[in-house]
Amino acid sequence: MDVSPVAEAGRFPAKAVVGEAVPIRATVFREGHDAVAATAVLVGPDGKDRARATMAPISPGRSQFETRLVPDVPGQWSFRVEGWSDPYATWSHDATVKVGAGIDVELMLTEGALLLTRAASRTGLAASAVRTLTDAVTALRDTSRPPQARLAAALSPQVISTLAADPVRDLVSPSPTYPLTVDRPLALFTAWYEMFPRSEGAVLDPTTGTWRSGTFATAAERLPAIAGMGFDVVYLTPIHPIGTTYRKGRNNSLAPEPGDPGSPYAIGSPDGGHDAIHPELGTFDDFDTFVTTARGLGLEVALDLALQCSPDHPWVTEHPEWFTTRADGTIAYAENPPKKYQDIYPLNFDNDPDGIYAEILRVIRVWITHGVTLFRVDNPHTKPVPFWQRLLAELRASDPEVIFLSEAFTVPAMMRGLAMVGFHQSYSYFTWRNTKKEIETYLAEVSGEDGSWLRPSFWPTTHDILPPYLQHGGVAGFAVRAILAATGSPSWGIYSGYELAERVPRPGVEEQIDNEKYEFKPRDWATAEDVGLSLLLTRLNEIRRAHPALQQLRNLTVHRTTDDALVCFSKRLPAALSPTGTDDTIIVVLTLDPHTPREGLLRLDLDALGLAGGDGERFIAHDLLSGDTFAWGREPYVRLDPWVQCAHIIHVRNP
């Protein structure tokens, strides 16, 4: 019962990626007092059993079992749980009690010999395992030895490990088989870098006061620095023609100045729509060169998919039925009261759902043919969920390498629903989780059961959002949020300019003044190294790539601290599940106070760290940020100064 990860009786497949340790749980029980156990079975895309593992009991007294299995190729997998009676565990318990009490001694030893004889006679058992079991049978039948010695031979560590690896299973009762979709690793472990290509290389003519847009060629000059910081995805805001009707000026003004470029989200002009490129950026050949350059640097290209139109979009005249017509005959523009977007017309998916679906599928495939492998989808929660379910299923079948990131800041039910119907990653509430309690609760939430569907992407800022913490936290605040984002989730991203700690807000709103959505914004990248954040971002991505534990989502444990500004959590990947074959354990402890030093004790859960219990236990704590090494135990003392070092990222080493 209660098999997980399962949603709606398997209606929505759980998610994993190649190399991810997938937690499988179930409640397993049986009648009577005999021992019960369970096995999790991973079924490959070919329908054959590919991996199995005996599940370990968790939550004592609640009959819950868990294990983790690792899929090794992308595709449509499935899994099941098999409950079974464990005759060896039953016998070992009964024999220990009865032989110790002198009750039915010979009977119990004979029954043990018969059981181990049966275990040794199974086909496919390794010769060493057969030898271990038959030696135990011989000892059980040796009446010249004391009963306790005969029993001990059958309960030896060698026998226990042999039967743990290949148990005797009676009365096997399988659960239904449940679906599991397995994607390529980038669907889980990703470092995004967002940029407006028109700003890179944009030039202001001092004599006329007008701007010349950057191009794909000038934007490509920024790619080596992005790749050098360790990012693996460069995400471009919309690159399509921009309308002029109701064009917005600087800071969302209704009165644009001559030469204002308009919002790239007001898509469409006489030059084309979603399948076209803004002429000032270049041609499709120029875009192809940009993609090729990025690929050569180890970067994949993501494109913003914003399913909306300016009043000048070709769809407005060719398909007026795709929009909402108001009582006065005008087309309804987008609103998010009190915000108004007069330059944008939303699509009405109710009027011609099949026609809209076919066109959007065509548009996406245009960009896939030009090398785009990821899409950041703007406001997917304002479109019908069945539309996304149909679209993502078709694209997963034809182009399984393509990844979709849901930018849906909305109610949890919708965010989870979009993830369940096929979005690979999701924007998250991380941006607004600031206090210790909020952060600890949210880390535990996203790495728990929901992590089987919703893969959170942690973004400290976006082109739309500059949260109060960063408005007032200074460079140290930017460092804190970057560390928390990069280590708290396998997927994270930054918006261009983070390296410079850009943090001047537009009065009254959580966004930057002189917002790049409405103007060109070239930056002086030569000053980034002076700020120091680019060096930190580089180091964070190096650490993430070097440590498999940070590339997983569902392996996070929050640890207690004695200070209300100190947050501590760990991620562990045991050797048996790690691609390196060695245990990888990372502890992150950081201060949330960007202004003053904080100190306190950590109350570490040593079991979660893979360390045996005991108050006196010590381990080597190697700080991957500073290079320092400490001797830590169950309750280490830490002091963090946000202007010197706001966090420790500890690699746990055996003493």
Image (cartoon, rainbow, N blue to C red):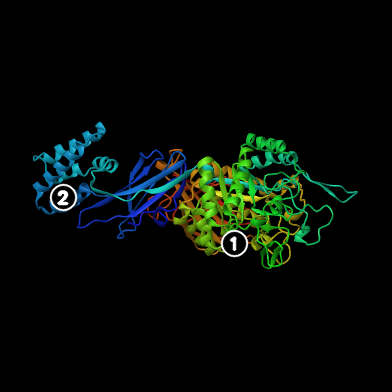
Of the 4 image quadrants, the one containing the C terminus is top left
Residue at which label 1 appears: 432
In this rendering, which labeled residue sits more in front, label 1 or label 2? Answer: 1
Label 1 sits on a secondary structure element that is: helix
Determine the residue positioned at 59% across, 59% down.
382
Tell me which amino acid carries mark 1. Trp
Kindly report the distance in space between the C-alpha atoms of the residues bearing marks 1 and 2: 58 Å
Residue 95 shows which numbered tag?
Answer: 2
Task: Confirm whether residue 595 shows in the render.
Answer: no
What's the residue type where badge 2 is placed?
Answer: Ala
Is 58 placed left or right of 478 in the picture? left
The quarter holding residue 309 reads: bottom right
Give the vertical position of 300 relative to 246 (above or below): above
User: Along the line of sight, which residue is nearer the eye, 633 or 140?
Assistant: 140
> Looking at the image, which is closer to me, 554 or 359?
359
| Percent coordinates x, y for residue 105 in the rendering | 10, 49
Counting from the top left corner in percent of width and height, residue 248 is at 76, 58
Looking at the picture, tell me which residue is in the foreground, 483 or 197: 197
**Residue 383 shown left or right of residue 548 in the figure:** right
Quarter placement of the N terminus: bottom left
**Pointer 2: residues within 10 angstroms few (<14), some, or many (20+)?**
many
